[in-house]
């Protein structure tokens, strides 16, 4: 912030242009790495197989327990939430895995640091391919869900005003989370590769991705309500379905149904700003310690 | 002076040499206990809450039985991940590191290397799976049927015989697929979890063709048999039931294991020759 205030407008404009250039090139590089091992169709199929498998797990659990007692509202909650959650996983893993990829596999991280490229735009650009894949996956999952499964959704109910707003705020917040995981990966050898997946797995439990937070024990509920992703998923479910899904749980109004749209928006704005600000500061802090420890170019071979 | 090993002695030493790092590695870096046992076990709770959300947690007994179903699935996940990443993709990674050409140049056989990978991987995965199970039993008070423990152990051993036979087959096939092997391993993770009934009973597939397809992966029938033996009160038909009689499933697994292991032996010879003809043994990043 102080650099922006004290630097000349010309320098700031130059920094922004350089960051955008780094982002653009890193995005192209990330897309090539993700996709150039197969033709587009095969790449598309392989990209959606994992999220499709995760959705199938939920469908099978629902099928196993529902029998003749169908619960379309509960299924819609499960399925829509899971579809949006794929973006959470792809964004966090996309950014955190970039450090491991560049340091361990391609051994290029030190060259990124010794080049004019800006590291944070580079990480965001490299992670963009996974985010785009996540968005495509969401579209495919929702298409399959609407066509083949008993979901209580309609095009007319989608809140097209809230949807992009919640989406953009959520992506800013998730990119912040991904940057934090990338910073942790910078100083981690053995488990750096899985740190993104581990955090995504924990978020699955805490953020109401598969069930309203009301079904959780009280002490876990408190953790859930402190996790920003919980509110983002609620916003996306609400905007997609045009209403609060599962507004009543075990005979009582759900916690999320008591949060209005404006209140939810305020929470998400705060989370997005806080997440991005903190993540940039945190990454810079960890990067400094990594340089002092001499581990930027240290290959762990894990 | 190093004593020269030949024949079966060389085969045995190769198997042990390949298995050793997988077995001893667990004690060198105990952080896996937290990252690969505690964290995934906590994540498994999410599946319990799905069942609760859908109205299945009607009593404490049902809750612990469902958690037992999920924990057994979580333990099975350990084995499938071991098959995908420490078996199927291993030779490809060895090629990337330049080790594969050394294996081929050495006097030992690739089959001994695969067998060592299997044994080491099995030990490693069993320690991890046991840790997940113990965590589940101690923290979540899961109770398994005592009469079912020995039969379940027998079913488990037969399942591993078939599963690691499949793993050896996959490692030879992945060697030819090159860089796509990594993507295929990633892509097969969750679909196999779903189709094999890791987090839901296998009978949830409801379609005999799908069940038969899922049965190609030994872990699906093995898990179904083990669940029926360890959680008989949950698999009483309402709403969960086994696909087949557990001993019929074990019989099928044994036959599959014989087929997979023989096929792995034939394939390793064939793939080794093909890899030389296509000159892909020494090429990295392909």
Image: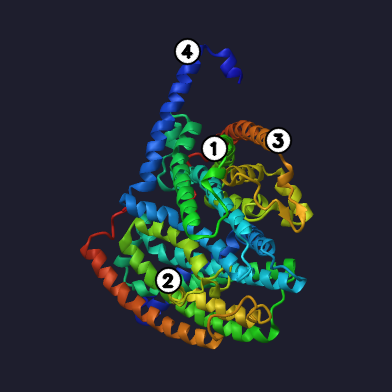
Q: CA distance from mark 3 to mark 1?
A: 18 Å
Proximity of marks 1 and 4: CB atoms separated by less than 8 Å:
no
In this rendered view, identify the residue nearer to me: B106 or B124: B124
Classify the position of the N terminus of chain B by image quarter.
bottom left
Residue A172 seen from this side: yes
Q: CA distance from mark 4 to mark 3?
A: 39 Å
In this rendered view, identify the residue nearer to me: B275 or B11: B275
In this rendered view, identify the residue nearer to me: B264 or A92: A92
**Of tags 4 and 3, which is closer to the observer?**
3
Instruction: Please tell me if label 1 and label 4 are on a single chain.
Output: yes
First reached walking from the N terminus: tag 1 or tag 4: 4
Residue that badge 3 annotates: A263
Proximity of marks 2 and 3: CB atoms separated by less than 8 Å:
no
Residue that badge 2 annotates: B167
The numbered mark at residue A10 is 4
Residue B14 seen from this side: no
Residue that badge 1 annotates: A160
Residue occupying the point 51% across, 74% down = B206
Residue occupying the point 38% across, 69% down = B170
């Amino acid at each position: 912030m102080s650099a922006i205030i004290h630097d000349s407008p010309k320098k700031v404009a130059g920094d922004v242009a350089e960051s955008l250039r780094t982002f653009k090139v890193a995005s192209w590089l990330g897309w090539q790495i993700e996709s150039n091992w197969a033709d587009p169709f095969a790449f598309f199929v392989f990209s959606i197989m994992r999220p499709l498998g995760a959705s199938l797990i939920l469908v099978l659990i629902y099928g196993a327990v529902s029998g003749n007692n169908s619960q379309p509202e509960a299924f819609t909650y499960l399925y829509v939430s899971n579809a949006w959650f794929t973006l959470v996983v792809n964004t966090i893993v996309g950014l955190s895995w970039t450090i491991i990829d560049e340091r361990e596999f391609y051994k290029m991280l030190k060259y990124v640091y010794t080049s004019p490229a800006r590291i944070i735009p580079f990480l965001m650009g490299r992670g963009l391919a996974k985010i785009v894949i996540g968005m495509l996956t969401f579209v495919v999952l929702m298409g399959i869900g609407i066509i083949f499964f008993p979901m209580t959704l309609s095009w007319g109910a989608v809140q097209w005003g809230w949807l992009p707003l919640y989406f953009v705020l959520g992506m800013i917040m998730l990119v912040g989370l991904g940057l934090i995981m990338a910073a942790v990966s910078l100083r981690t050898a053995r488990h750096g590769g899985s740190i993104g997946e581990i955090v995504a797995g924990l978020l699955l439990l805490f953020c109401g991705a598969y069930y309203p937070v009301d079904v959780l024990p009280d002490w876990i509920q408190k953790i859930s309500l402190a996790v920003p992703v919980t509110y983002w998923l609620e916003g996306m479910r609400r905007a997609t379905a045009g209403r609060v899904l599962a507004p009543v749980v075990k005979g009582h109004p759900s916690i999320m149904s008591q949060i209005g749209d404006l209140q939810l928006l305020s929470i998400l704005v705060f989370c997005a700003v806080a997440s991005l600000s903190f993540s940039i500061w945190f990454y810079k802090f960890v990067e400094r310690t990594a340089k002092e420890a001499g581990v930027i170019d240290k290959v762990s071979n894990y | 002076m190093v004593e020269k090993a030949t024949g079966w002695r060389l085969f045995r030493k190769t198997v042990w040499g390949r298995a050793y790092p997988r077995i001893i590695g667990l004690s060198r870096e105990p952080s896996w206990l937290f990252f690969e046992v505690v964290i995934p076990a906590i994540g498994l709770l999410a599946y319990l809450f799905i069942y609760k959300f859908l109205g299945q947690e009607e009593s404490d007994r049902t809750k612990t039985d469902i958690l037992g179903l999920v924990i057994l699935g979580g333990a099975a996940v350990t084995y499938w991940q071991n098959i995908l990443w420490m078996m199927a993709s291993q030779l490809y990674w060895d090629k990337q590191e330049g080790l594969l050409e050394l294996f081929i140049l050495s006097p030992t056989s690739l089959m001994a290397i695969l067998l060592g990978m299997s044994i080491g991987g099995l030990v490693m995965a069993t320690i991890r799976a046991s840790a997940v199970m113990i965590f589940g039993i101690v923290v979540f008070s899961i109770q398994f049927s005592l009469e079912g423990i020995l039969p379940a152990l027998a079913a488990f051993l037969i399942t591993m015989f078939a599963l690691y036979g499949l793993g050896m087959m996959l490692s030879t096939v992945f060697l030819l697929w090159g860089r796509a092997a990594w993507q295929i391993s990633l892509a097969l993770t969750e679909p196999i979890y779903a189709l094999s009934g890791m987090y839901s009973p296998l009978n949830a597939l409801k379609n005999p063709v799908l069940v038969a397809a899922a049965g190609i992966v030994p872990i699906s029938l093995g898990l179904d048999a083990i669940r029926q033996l360890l959680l008989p009160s949950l698999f009483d038909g309402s709403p969960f039931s086994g696909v087949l009689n557990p001993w019929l499933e074990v019989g099928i697994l044994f036959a599959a294991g014989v087929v997979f292991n023989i096929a792995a032996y034939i394939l390793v010879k064939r793939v080794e020759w093909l890899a030389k003809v296509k000159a892909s043994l020494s090429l990295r990043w392909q």
